[in-house]
Image: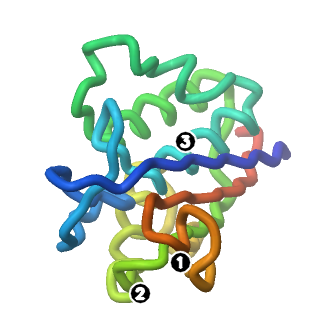
Amino acid sequence: MRIGHGYDVHRLVEGRRLILGGVEIPYERGLLGHSDADVLTHAVMDALLGAAGLGDIGKHFPDSDPAYAGADSLVLLDRVMELLARAGYRVGNVDATILAQRPKLAAYLPTMAENLARHMGVSPAQVNVKATTEEGLGFTGAGEGMAAHAVCLLELRI
């Protein structure tokens, strides 16, 4: 078994869609990034890659590569899963937390978990997604951006 941790952060700006876990959430601002800036999926990918000792998303999908401009992060997750399969790993479970003052995300969390599970080829019971505010503290609490943490357990396929 291998354990990984992932973290990602993106600034909130006008004129961008807000995508979290592959779900488009109605909000007046979205996350700024080279791809769709899905901070949740990025943290999950980094946790998976880290657990397998395969680097991070910057190594595999650099923001200097125009091929990833506007990329759907769930498609990038599919590519991460291909890397894990080649290395002999399968996902045991993923637990992730989104840090965002607004908008309220509770209604969207189950769909985010289902999307992530589907793209990782696991049961939704193996993926937990939650959200928290930071009580108005820091850049997330001030509404300047969003962050996400994810941890995962990988198992060697037998």
Q: Residues within 10 Å of mark 3 (few under 14, many from 20)?
A: many
Q: Nearer the viewer, residue 136 or 24?
A: 136
Q: Quadrant of the C terminus?
A: top right
Asked if 1 appears above or below 122 in the picture, the reply is above
Residue 110 lies in what quarter of the image? Answer: bottom left
Residue 104 lies in what quarter of the image? Answer: bottom left
| Residue on which the image places disc 3 | 45
The residue at 48%/60% (across/down) is: 146
Contact (Cβ within 8 Å) of mark 1 with mark 2:
yes
- Viewer-side label of 1, 3: 1
Residue 116 lies in what quarter of the image? Answer: bottom left
Name the amino acid type tagged 1: Ala
Name the amino acid type tagged 2: Ala
Q: Nearer the viewer, residue 38 or 83?
A: 38
Q: Which circle marks residue 131 in the picture?
A: 1
Q: Is residue 127 left or right of residue 73?
A: right
The residue at 23%/70% (across/down) is: 25
Distance between mark 1 and mark 2 Cα atoms: 7 Å
Contact (Cβ within 8 Å) of mark 3 with mark 2:
no
Q: Position of residue 142 (x, y in %)?
A: 50, 71
Name of the residue lying farthest toward the top? 65
Q: Residues within 10 Å of mark 1 (few under 14, many from 20)?
A: some
Asked if 53 appears above or below 98 in the picture, the reply is above
- Dot 2 falls on a residue whose secondary structure is helix
Q: Position of residue 137 (x, y in %)?
A: 63, 75
Name the amino acid type tagged 3: Met
The residue at 46%/51% (across/down) is: 39
Q: Position of residue 117 (x, y in %)?
A: 45, 60
| Residue on which the image places disc 2 | 106
- Dot 3 falls on a residue whose secondary structure is helix
Name of the residue lying farthest toward the left? 15
